[in-house]
Image (cartoon, coloured by chain):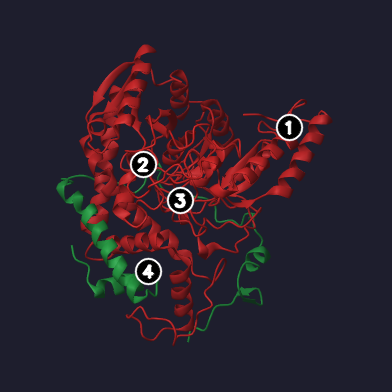
Chain colours: A red, B green
Amino acid sequence: MKIANQTTSAVSLVQAALGKIDQYQDWHIFTFVNRDAALKRAREIDKKIKNGEPVGRLAGVPYALKDNFLSKEGETTASAKILTGLTSPLNATCVEKLEAEDAIMIGRTNLDAFAHGSSTENSFFGPTKNAFDPERVAGGSSGGSAVAVALGCAEFATGTDTGGSIRQPASFNGVFGIKPTYGAISRYGVVAMASSTDVVGFFAKTPADLDLLMSVASGKDAKDLTSLPDFYGFEDKKLKKKKIGFVKEFVESPALNPELKTALEAKLSAFRSKGYEIVELSLPTLEYALATYYILQPAEVASNLSRYDGIRYGFRSKNLDPAKVCSADENPEKTALDLCYQQTRQEGFMRENKRRIMIGNFVLSSGFYDAYFLKAAKARTLIIKEFEKAFEKVDAILSPVAPNPAFRLGEKVNDPVSMYLEDVMSVPVNLAGIPAVAFPAGWTESNPASKSTKNPTKNPTKNPTKNPVSKLPLGLQLLGPRRSDKQLLEMVEEIL
Amino acid sequence: MEITDKEISHLASLSNFSLAADEKNALKTDLKNILKYISKLDELDVSNVEPTFQVFEMENVWRPDEITPQDASCEALLALTKESLDHQVKVPKVL
């Protein structure tokens, strides 16, 4: 990425990014643009450089912040109505670390509300469009961040990945994304979704940029007790088998798009030509990872989102007349406080938020806990063990991120199960807490039209690609054992 | 498995939502479909397997019970509330 120095000014970097943000307004990437503050910051950094004062490793680099990171600049809404109006009095640790290296936050990016989704269509502010076809989804939940990097609105962007929310939008928009080892980067100041799988990570245009960002952001944080002691860049070179695996069950799945299968085979060949042995792995328990994830994650969501009540911050319903609002039946003698909670949550959450909270409360409720939540927690153990065994045989596993390239806006948003199936190849990584790097692996031959769209080439002038709506990015991911984050980036670099 | 109207109302109550009738019906269908999918786990034998609740690699983390400086002041946090009184958060009537 371009970093400000004696010849490249921070102001020019910020102005270039702002120009792209204006150009791609219709893509609906940002929930807030930090225009004036970013330019002010850039001028300060340029002055330092001119005076020969030391500057950070990310001097003047404009970056996009996913809107679920607390920052003093702009409202932190997580693209949810219930958090509108919240201006954070503090910065997330990740934001502090980036800004300590003189990176400049150019704007906050759109996401599925509370990161619940795989398309960024569940945002209170409306969907973000795919960088290469505005009639297709950006992917999600970090859709805004991925598109911001793909279209040059930022040099890099932050994301969170609870079940694929960095890797899937990265692959839908042709950029690199890292989902680090669980605990590598502090989650302090990041809106919680499912705490046992939430990780902070990044989008960028090269593995080298992701490497720099990891070295800046990772490490122990006293404010996040689950953060790991800094290992990034210090780990032993443990990956010496020179073996790459692929998952037989994924490659043979009828759900896998044939072009993605071809792209995977091409990259396996690329590894082979670099001296790696290719190993077929059978990981039969991964078939149960999605069901496991869609029990454990909603349970944690129900718990984490119970804090939003309209009392301490954010949105509060104005419809608090008991005669006018419908009752939840079970508590006819509601107090004004009960009513405030229920109406605020009723109006403040999206439908998908409600689905997850209710499923979570269902699987945790007495009578169903053993059959759902406990069973899923046990299945998680089996999935972790299956990965551990696999990594005794290979250094890393090459896999698709999702079964298909970007789908059409509106195609899945009203069918939760078909949307969840998008995550089938990404969630096993989160359950095991292992790292994965998503990277571009070519393009589709054409842009398959769907029945619902008769004229896929309308508005071609608005499309940013040279060849409008003709091709979509294909993305793959490389998975490794815990703490292999840096080696994964190095391996991806080898086959570009 | 079937989700009854009573169960939807109970879950709405646990979740603190005041769902409208049409939303209850839509969620009933959605939840039924989701539960059908996640019941796939019934096929998996997990007998004699220990559950995993976290991958933090740690046991309890202890720290001295001391007040440490915080990022946000009490005043800054109170400023976020809809109503406050005498340095406290004011809530709607509870009695």
Q: Secondary structure at mark 3?
A: loop
Residue, disc 2: A449
- Looking at numbered disc 2 in the image, what kind of residue is underneath it? Ala
In this view, the mark in front (1 or 2): 2
Distance between mark 4 and mark 2 Cα atoms: 40 Å
Distance between mark 2 and mark 3 Cα atoms: 21 Å
Distance between mark 1 and mark 3 Cα atoms: 36 Å
Q: Determine the chain carrying the residue at label 4.
A: B
Question: Where is the N terminus of chain A found, in terms of image quarters?
Answer: top right
Decide: few, some or many residues near mark 4? Use Cα within 10 Å; few <14, some 14-19, many ≥20.
Answer: many
Is A114 left, or right, of B40 in this rendering?
Answer: right
**Co-location on one chain, circles 1 and 2:** yes
- Image mark for residue B15: 4
Q: Secondary structure at mark 1?
A: loop
Residue A121 spot, x, y in % from top left: 44, 53
Residue, disc 1: A55
Can the viewer see residue A120?
Answer: yes
- Looking at numbered disc 1 in the image, what kind of residue is underneath it? Val
Tag 3 and tag 4, C-beta contact below 8 Å: no
Decide: few, some or many residues near mark 2? Use Cα within 10 Å; few <14, some 14-19, many ≥20.
Answer: some
Pick whichever of labels 2 and 3 is earlier in the sequence. 3
- Residue A334's place in the image compared with A50, above or below, is below
**Co-location on one chain, circles 4 and 1:** no
In this view, the mark in front (2 or 3): 2
Is A431 left, or right, of A232 in this rendering?
Answer: left
Q: Secondary structure at mark 4?
A: helix
**Co-location on one chain, circles 2 and 3:** yes
Distance between mark 4 and mark 1 Cα atoms: 49 Å
Tag 4 and tag 1, C-beta contact below 8 Å: no
- Residue A481's place in the image compared with A18, above or below, is above
In this view, the mark in front (4 or 2): 2
Residue, disc 3: A120
